[in-house]
Amino acid sequence: MDELTVEAVDSLEPALDAETAEYVLYGGKGGVGKTTMAAATALASATDGTSTLVVSTDPAHSLSDTLGVDIPDEPTRLREDVPLYGVEIDPDKAMDEAPIFGDDGSAMGPLGDLLGDEGFDPMMGGQMPGADEAAAMQLLLTYLDDQRFDRVVVDTAPTGHTLRLLELPELLDSMVGRFVALRERLGGLMEGVKGMFGEEAPAEGDGMDDLDELADRVERLRAILRDPQRTDFRIVTVPEEMAVQESLRLRSRLEEFGIPVGTVVVNRVMEPLSQVTDDVPEETFVSPDLEHCEFCQRRWAVQQGALQSAQDLFRGHDVKRVPLFADEVAGERMLRVVAACLQ
């Protein structure tokens, strides 16, 4: 990029549409640019004056590199001039601190006491997903409830991890229901047994308060994720046929969970910036030479087919395009440009 033209980009004020949801989640396969989109969206939101928390649930964190600041494992203000906060969830620490997990990550507090050393068994309806994912879900629940933030933007892990994360509310709901029923059936029996030996009956809710609280929070999470007025789950893909097909499968799975997809972002499209947004001077960026570069022409032909598929398969969604940039997309200057493309 010509350094003489950088000021034109620096003067750009990223903005979000007034209808942007309270919770914005970016999902998709690994390496498509979810972190970039989340960082750009969070920056634009904070620049508008909205107190915004950007969260990374991907164990392979790159949010710190993208924003150009160190992001700890606790929500921390990243900028003094705008209300931008960030957190990279440390799955190991989250698992250690999660109240429903034992020291080895396989038991769940009072639930582990009931199930024993073997943890979850088939009577619970299947095996428990990774403890680190479950712990991340607990922290995500906490952040969604945090009154300090008016908007939460989530950079999710690659598709497989994200789907396991999204399966947790259903799994935990089933698990909680079974244990509540078990408690009700056994509560009177335990009181009778203790009475026979002159022992004091257990206090009401003893050892199960965490479970009741978890049930309430799981229900709130389900309601949030399924409410299109509050949550916008955005699928990020690239203009390649296989990536588009995987994105379609992700949308289908999200629909099974009742989670609506509002936006699809096609990243790294090899086209002039002027075709995407008028808010950035095109002369500040290198555009592909589709007239003389044979490689550019062939790649553009491949991308055109994938773009057409994306438009057809995601008809009815808001499909955004973000160009392939010659420079690395990191730091505020480039994130401002990406934010302009996402408007």
Image: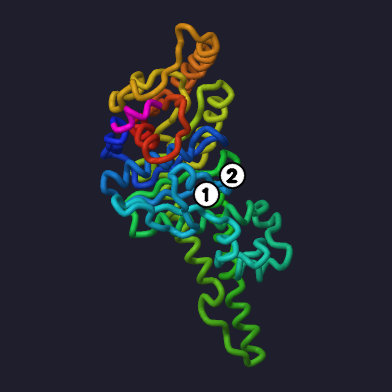
Work out which residue is located at the far bottom of the displayed protein and give it: 198
Q: In the drawing, does residue 245 fall left or right of residue 112?
A: left
Identify the residue at image location x=59%, y=58%.
175
In the image, is residue 250 part of the stretch drawn in magenta?
Answer: no
Q: In the drawing, does residue 220 fall left or right of residue 114?
A: left
Identify the residue at image location x=52%, y=28%.
248
Disc assigned to residue 57: 1
- Closer to viewer: mark 2 or mark 1: 1
Q: Secondary structure at mark 2?
A: helix
* Quadrant into which the N terminus falls: top left
**Residue matched to label 2:** 161
Q: In the drawing, does residue 320 fall left or right of residue 328?
A: left
Picture coordinates of residue 180, whole percent (x, y): 55, 65
The boundaries of the magenta stretch are 1-7
Main SS category, magenta section: helix
Do callouts 2 and 1 mark residues in contact (Cβ within 8 Å)? yes
Distance Cα–Cα, label 2 vs label 1: 9 Å
Circle 1 packing at 10 Å, graded few (<14), some (14-19), many (20+), is many
Identify the residue at image location x=54%, y=34%.
250
The earlier-in-sequence mark between 2 and 1 is 1
* Quadrant into which the C terminus falls: top left
Type of colouring: rainbow
Picture coordinates of residue 138, whole percent (x, y): 51, 58
Q: Nearer the viewer, residue 211 or 94?
A: 94
Q: In the drawing, does residue 12 fall left or right of residue 1?
A: left
> Which kind of residue does numbered mark 2 sit on?
His
User: Can you say whether 284 is above or below 205 in the image?
Assistant: above
User: Can you say whether 40 is above or below 297 in the image?
Assistant: below
Q: Nearer the viewer, residue 96 or 196?
A: 96
Picture coordinates of residue 114, whole percent (x, y): 66, 69
> Which kind of residue does numbered mark 1 sit on?
Thr
Identify the residue at image location x=53%, y=82%.
203
